[in-house]
Amino acid sequence: MTSRFLKAFQPVIQFIPEIKAPERRVSFNEKLLWTAVALIIYLVMSEIPLYGLGRGEDILFYRVIFASSKGTLMELGIGPIVTAGLILQLLAASGFISVDFSDPEDRSLFSGVSKVFSVIMTVVQASAYLIGGFFGTLSANQAVIIFIQLIIAGLIVLLLDEMIQKGWGIGSGISLFILAGVAQRIMLDCFSTMPSLSEPVKYRGIISAMIQSLITGGSLSSLFMRPGDDPSILGLLLTVGIFLFCIYAQGVRVEIPIAHSRFRGFRGRYPISLLYVSNLPVIFASALFGNIYVISQILWNNYHNNLSLSPWISLFGDFEYTQSGSLQPRGGMAYYVVAPRGFMDVLGNPVRYAVYAVLLIFFCIVFSWVWLEVGGLDPKTVARQLVDSGMQVPGFRRSEKPIESILKRYIPIVTLLGGLIVGLLAALADFFGAFGTGTGILLSVGIIYQYYQQIMSERIEEIYPGIRKFLGG
């Protein structure tokens, strides 16, 4: 039964802009075209500065996860969409709302509520950035102009994501924008010819700096580990290593033999991958860390002088101003949710970043289990889907219970193990300064693999149209 909480949003949903699903079969080439259009719009918005903006407070460690760009129309990025999804999943996991995802009406209602929450979070986050002083001191007119720009940009991002997900494109807008942001950051870390932050006479991009050193007769040893945010050879090697490991992990799986009850000759396998819940746990963990940082900074910026509230606010985050006038955490939860910017950072404060790693791994495991329950990936739901599609495990009667008991041997263990591995890899990559951040690398490999599967599926369905009907498409 659909939750009353979801039904309460029905009158509001009709006022939210909507992209209609295609009423015809969209060709593969047309999907590529619309996906490219969405990507171009995102990249253009990432370069257009917010009109009337003085300065911005950069929060580097979750720019990647939110696909945002400092001081531009993409200042909020996909943050509101990810945060709205996180809230709804926590509500579903807690039992506050109930949704039957096998019911088209429930799916449509849940999707509508997600859009409403995304719009609400766009308004909340835009207001939070202005109130929290992320753009410096602004006049009332400047604040209103920037607020309107952020709201309009947020709606455009929401519609682009919906356009792709409803079948006009391939994959999802969220995945596409994250992948574009990570790829851009990796390319800059490799080939940027901007001056190094620690050594202005050298290039910042590690490959550019290596070529420069070889030409000038310099030593490469100084590039193996560089201070601050400068990319290093160690970071490059780790980036390549994690990419290769993630590609390998995608192929590690348990395969359960299945057969179709109506087609005697059909034999197949149901794969349970080591990364069963994909990269979603690290997305939600990073989104949680980012929101903790933003909220704590807003509270501190506005109430740290209040004697009665100051001790409580310090628990969320205690900040101080740097010489450049920006805020940096020095205590509270915000202090422990910021990723290190390289191995030198870790050596300088090992306790802080050990706590960060433990928290990241813990929440990756927690969100793995949460997504297993609310994302329709649990043994009971999967068993029902297999039976409804006419499948059964050879040697067992065609019933949900036997299949569910077999799936229970593997899915819970693989889910927790996958969450542990994803969290550990993300923390390790952050510790050694991997390009695009550890979270970004994990996300990009998972997204590339998903795109590969979807593109192959689209091509097969286009070549053999009959297979779509057989698969229930």
Image (tube, rainbow, N blue to C red):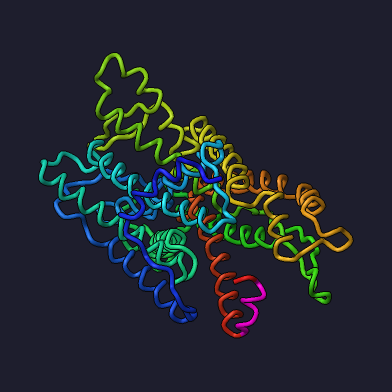
Name above or below for residue 448 compared with residue 135. below
Residue 180: which quarter of the image?
Answer: bottom left
The quadrant of the picture occupied by the N terminus is: top right
> What's the residue at 63%, 58% (across, down)?
245
Residue 48: which quarter of the image?
Answer: bottom left
60 in magenta: no
Q: Is residue 235 visible?
A: yes
> What's the residue at 47%, 32% (across, down)?
349
The quadrant of the picture occupied by the C terminus is: bottom right
Q: Position of residue 361 (x, y in %)?
A: 58, 40
Asked if residue 279 lies left or right of residue 180, the reply is right
The dominant secondary structure in magenta is: helix
Provide the residue span drawn in magenta.
Answer: 464-471
Name above or below for residue 467 compared with residue 148. below
469 in magenta: yes
Name above or below for residue 168 compared with residue 432. below
Residue farthest along the top direction in this orientation: 308
> What's the residue at 64%, 54% (across, down)?
275
Pick the front one: 450 or 56: 450
Pick the front one: 199 or 417: 417
Asked if residue 412 lies left or right of residue 298, the reply is right
Asked if residue 9 lies left or right of residue 425, the reply is left
Pick the front one: 191 or 332: 332
> What's the residue at 23%, 36% (across, down)?
131
Q: Is residue 213 visible?
A: no
Asked if residue 215 lies left or right of residue 448, the reply is left
Name above or below for residue 138 compared with residue 303. below
Residue 470: which quarter of the image?
Answer: bottom right
